[in-house]
Image (cartoon, rainbow, N blue to C red):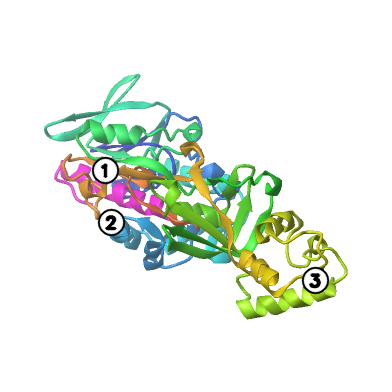
Amino acid sequence: MSNPIAAIIIIGGGAAGMAAAIAAAREAPDASVTVYEPNAVLGRKLRITGKGRCNVTNDCSPAEVMENVTKNRKFLTGALFRFTPADTMAFFEENGVPLKTERGRRVFPVSDKAADISSAMERVMRGLGVRVAQEKVTSLLHGDGGVYGVKTASGDHTADAVIVATGGASYPGTGSRGDGYRFARSVGMAVSEPIPSLIPVITREDTAPLSGLSLKNVTLTVTDGGKEIYSEMGEMLFTHFGVSGPLVLSASAHMRGDMKRYRMFIDLKPALDDATLDARLIADLAKYGQRDFVNSLSDLLPQKLIDPVIRLTGIDPRKKSNAITREERSALRNTLKQFPLTPVAFRPIDEAIITSGGVEVSGIHPKTMMSKTVPGLFFAGEVIDVDAYTGGYNLQIAFSTGVAAGQNAAQYALAKYDITT
């Protein structure tokens, strides 16, 4: 491009950064758009999401996305209606990535390769003339008139608008090291302390014998001081340190502060009410009446769960099944409906899928993603203090805020030269 009329810089080449770059380049074709990304590969975190498959969005309405946002959902209204899940799906389909929709309306590339999503974004971005600089931004250039560029090891780089899309503090190996929080603070913006969200939970109970056991179609309930704060049916996983999997990750978004307040309960048979489950237990115990109790539950439970369940009931595992009393059967039924776990801590923040916290939304215009106090400074993606459940919602937030930031940064930059798109 010769003699560009305006310059826009995006800090970060992840999902939000690339979405912002594409939107800015489309909004202002004659502007210079540059992405600063220290990693040799763009979209590094994007390439490992969904265990390398990339749950790119959720096939639902913007309003339904908002229902799955756990923090500052109203802030996202404008961005999500500006660039919807349908828009995300259309973008990838139109750019050579066929998609499929799986359970829970989760959308994945047909190839099951997250790299296809990242590569498509990069291909479109470069096709629009966006320049990629493999440099680390060390600070913002700002003065009384707002932000006017960035500083890197190679020097100062001026711009009419700067978009911070650096991600949060999770997965630091991908480049998300909290730099965006530092940039925001450097210009006087408020930042909520980042904490892990969508993260595995360490339990007091020794789960090592259960490690690797995946439970499907169970209901996980979390209580806070005895009050239910989360309850959903789905999948979860036992690990050597505690529990993980979709249900646990979503539950973690509701758990803040002192972990001593929380308890977890697994309904191992959510499809059966008490009466139906009791009838099932009577039938199974009669079927294996001459066997020891420990050998009569294989039709009901995964093998790894039998011993822990029996220990919780207090029933002698060598007692004959046909000698189990009504009270003992009641204890078994209650354990199956409320298998207890005691959370004691989250795993380290660098294992979190996302971080909760970040640049406070009170300091950002929700329609434009521009700072309310620093003209020319925009934010997109996880660096903002918003987060949601698993299921493609967080990536949709990244795309939607990225598009909003990119379009509005381009309009802001052009307005400096009395040019409108």
Tell me which corner region of the image, top left, top right, bottom left or bottom right, holds residue 195.
top left
- Distance between the Cα atoms at labels 3 and 2? 60 Å
- What residue is shown at x 35% (from left), y 32% (from top)? 179
Which one is in front, 401 or 394? 394
Q: Do the residues labelled 3 and 1 touch (CB within 8 Å)?
A: no
Identify which amino acid the numbered label 3 is placed on.
Answer: Ala
Magenta residues, as a range? 395-421
Give SS at disc 1.
Answer: strand
Which one is in front, 42 or 129? 42
Find residue 236 and report its horizontal and vertical position in percent.
60, 56
User: Is any atom of residue 59 visible in this view?
Assistant: yes
- Distance between the Cα atoms at labels 2 and 1? 15 Å
Q: Are marks 2 and 1 in contact (CB under 8 Å)?
A: no
Is residue 404 shown in magenta? Answer: yes
Identify which amino acid the numbered label 1 is placed on.
Answer: Phe
Q: Is residue 283 above or below residue 85?
A: below
Which one is in front, 407 or 256? 256
Q: Residue 378 carries which label?
A: 1
Q: Is residue 213 left or right of residue 1?
A: right
Give SS at disc 2.
Answer: helix
Q: In this view, does 153 lie to the left or right of 360?
A: right
Closer mark to the observer between disc 3 and disc 2: 3
Circle 1 packing at 10 Å, graded few (<14), some (14-19), many (20+), is many
Give SS at disc 3.
Answer: helix
Tell me which corner region of the image, top left, top right, bottom left or bottom right, holds residue 159.
top left
Instruction: Decide which of tag 3 and tag 1 comes sooner along the chain.
Output: 3
Circle 2 packing at 10 Å, graded few (<14), some (14-19), many (20+), is some
Q: Is residue 159 left or right of residue 314?
A: left
Instruction: Decide which of tag 3 and tag 2 comes sooner along the chain.
Output: 2
Q: Residue 323 carries which label?
A: 3
Circle 3 packing at 10 Å, graded few (<14), some (14-19), many (20+), is some
Question: Which residue position is annotated with label 2?
Answer: 75
